[in-house]
Structure formats: C-alpha cells, structure tokens
Amino acid sequence: MRILVVEDEPLLAMLMEESLEDLGHEMVGVAATVAQAEAILDGHIVDAAFLDFSLADDATSVPVAERLRREGKPFYYVSGYNSIAPNENTPEAPLLSKPFSLSALKDALDAMAA
C-alpha cells in the first residue's frame, strides 16, 4: 500500500517510515502539518494513512481525516493518549496508541487492507 504519515515528532516519523517500508509498504510522504499533508494528497495517490491526532500549535489532523473519509481512504489516528477527544465533526477511525509495537503497526495495516 501507499502510505501517508502525519506526525509532528521527527524521530517518531522516521521510525514509522522505516517500519512501514520494512513491512513492504511504499511511503508516499511524511507530513508534520495539515498543509504539508494536503500537499502530499494533492500530488500523490494514497491508499491509507496514519494521522497523529494532536499536532503542534494545538492543531489536529481532523482536516486530513475529513478529506481521507470523503475519498474513501482508510486511516488510523495515532496518539500518545489512550483515547482521543473527538467531537461530532471528527471522523471516526481506529486508534493506534503510542508507543506501539511493529506487530501492532502490522495489524493496523492488515485491517486497513481488508
């Protein structure tokens, strides 16, 4: 699958990128902001995504989630919290809790591929 990762922590973004490639997936791009993610989506075909729910400067990845939902693309939220606080405007998606194992990442990929 062609994967987009939205993650504002560079070390975790690099770890996710390496792990996804090790699992045989193609990285379309890594974005630290909503604007960067939108630019990647505008220029590439994305099959699935992992979205850090909380981004820098009190931003969230909800605009990216909304776009992925409209386009019918599966995604997981990623968060260091055991739950996230969505509101009625937040697209629902499964949560991959940080820190996660390679096995948990693979399970999430398998679920999105199904």
Image: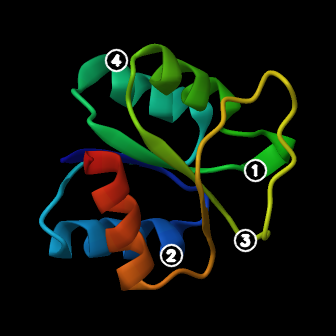
Q: Nearer the N terminus, badge 1 or badge 3? A: 1
Tell me which residue sits at (17%, 58%) in the image.
Answer: 25
Q: Nearer the N terminus, badge 4 or badge 2? A: 2
Q: Are marks 1 and 3 in contact (CB under 8 Å)?
A: no
Disc 1: which residue? 56
Q: CA separation, marks 4 and 1?
A: 22 Å
The amino acid at mark 4 is: Asp
Disc 2: which residue? 11
Disc 3: which residue? 80
**Res 108 visible:** yes
The amino acid at mark 1 is: Ala
Disc 4: which residue? 42
Query: Front-most of 82 and 2?
Result: 82
Q: CA separation, marks 4 and 2?
A: 25 Å
Q: Are marks 1 and 2 in contact (CB under 8 Å)?
A: no
- Element marked by disc 1: helix
Viewer-nearest of discs 2 and 3? 3
- Element marked by disc 3: loop
- Badge 1: residue crowd in 10 Å (few <14, some 14–19, many ≥20): few
Tell me which residue sits at (79%, 69%) in the image.
Answer: 81
The amino acid at mark 2 is: Leu
- Element marked by disc 4: helix
Q: Are marks 4 and 2 in contact (CB under 8 Å)?
A: no
Residue 103, quarter of the rendered image: bottom left
- Badge 3: residue crowd in 10 Å (few <14, some 14–19, many ≥20): some
> Which residue occupies the extreme left position in the image?
24
Q: Nearer the N terminus, badge 1 or badge 2? A: 2
